[in-house]
Amino acid sequence: MAEFTSQQRAALTSAARHNLVNAISKTGKTQLLIRLYLDWQEQPGEFKAIFLTSNGFSTQRITDQLHRITKQDWTGQLIGTFSEIGHKLVQKYYADLNYRRVPKVVPDIAVAEDRQAAKLVASKLIGDTPSDQTRQTFIDQWNQEFVSRLHQKDVASPRSLLIDAANLFAKLAHHSLANVHHLAADDVHDFSTEEMMALLPLQERMEKSYISGNTNVAINDRYQDLDIDNWINLINREDFTAHPLSACFNIGSSHGWFLHQLAAFNSKKLFDISPTFAGDPNIPALFEVLVPSVGYMVDVIHEMERQLQLGIRNRVMGVVMRTRDEARAMARTLGKPCCILWDKTRLYSRFDLPTKGIVVTTPYDAPFLNLDYVTLPNCMKGYWPHPDVRGAESCRHLFLRAVSSARLGTTFLIPDPSNGLLVSQFVSEGCNPQVVTKAAQFKPAGSTG
């Protein structure tokens, strides 16, 4: 275990039944869980462990990593989101769930009427306004009525597959899953409320479980469909042993949750006319580039690709736009691929993740693309934060998610003040020398700061 830190080794060797790896991005949560899963499962075949992910990107990244380590195919194993795993199980055990044949999978919107009808049935049994004590019973009754209706039609949706997977583990206790005694769940802070509710009974039946997540993201990121109370109850349970992993660059947990993410790249340089990005590519850095025009911004991005030698070094740089429509427009302008496939209800299907060059994406997709560098265009007030988004906090969380996706460095394209535009306040929030420890300094040729 020489490649792991002392904190990771402590988590790997924990004798506790249930373990919580609670840490921010880029601290090695996923690699720790991959090592644990390999120790439990050893090789593809009989199901001994289950590895839950938050979306299709994470699933593919984990199966690809397992393939690189073992040279074996892991796509048929219990690795994926609840819906992905449910899809695999239903194809094998559909008869045990009262399907007459392998169900046809349709989008959730296609079974919205069945979902609403199931809710009415549950309301008659529990009451139209369930109390806090009966709410979980109400949701469970609603879910079971919903899947029962779909079973009769031999139809499944991502939501129903989640429920079917939970039923096969918890309610039916299917014999083929009896030897599954270990659970790894990655990025639980991105789980939906229903996924969290399915996770808890699954975790209870395991001999050993490891759950990873980021408390700050779970509590503060309002874009996620996570019931905050569920997350707080999960991490505060007495039977969990917590394993915090420290951030890099000596940023401690006492620092603000936004600061100790953004400040990880706090080796600040400022370029004005002709940016040069040469230097040691392995030294993490934060750069600001003055951008007098949109055309110049596009030229800077292309110049970064050339000087960072992304193709030669097999490095990936993500150009992160605030919305999917803006990402598509930027991809057309740059003539680069666009990766905006983030979707927690997506069923497992393989797609080619970028391995070098530039990819245009969004803050939600960025953490799952293994980006070496992140470039944030339009770092100005009026875009970060955007006036159409309710409150600056929502934009701040998106901005944070993008910044913390970079492994080696982040570049902010800021407006030239002579144009009357103001720099986004988010850029300066992580650059307070009274709070952070600066990374190693170096002065690339051509810099002015």
Image (tube, helix red, strand yellow):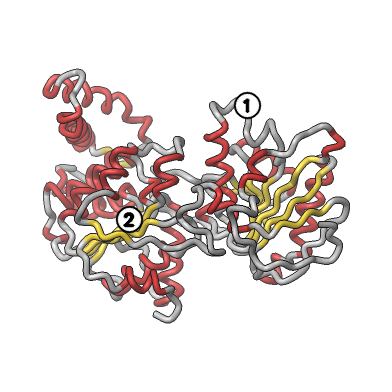
Residue 17, percent from left and from top: 20, 63
Q: Tell me, yes or no, if residue 102 can be seen here.
A: no
Rendered residue at 62%/36% (across/down): 325
Residue 23, percent from left and from top: 42, 57
Q: Tell me, yes or no, if residue 435 can be seen here.
A: yes
Rendered residue at 86%/62% (across/down): 446
Residue highlighted by disc 2: 52
Tell which tag, 1 or 2, sits nearer the viewer. 1
Q: Amino acid at mark 1?
A: Pro
Position of residue 262 in the picture relative to residue 292 (left or right): left
**Most foreground residue, 384 or 205:** 384
Disc count in the image?
2
Sort mark 2 into few (<14), some (14-19) or many (20+) by Cα contacts within 10 Å. many
Rendered residue at 40%/41% (across/down): 219
**Most foreground residue, 145 or 253:** 253
Q: Which mark is residue 387?
A: 1
Which of the marked residues, 1 or 2, is nearer the chain's N terminus?
2
Location of residue 318 with respect to 325 vertically, above or below: below
Sort mark 1 into few (<14), some (14-19) or many (20+) by Cα contacts within 10 Å. few
Residue 260, percent from left and from top: 53, 53
Position of residue 320 in the picture relative to residue 59 (left or right): right
**Most foreground residue, 324 or 31:** 31
Location of residue 445 with respect to 386 vertically, above or below: below
Residue 218, percent from left and from top: 40, 44
Q: Amino acid at mark 2?
A: Leu
Which quadrant of the figure contains the N terminus? bottom left
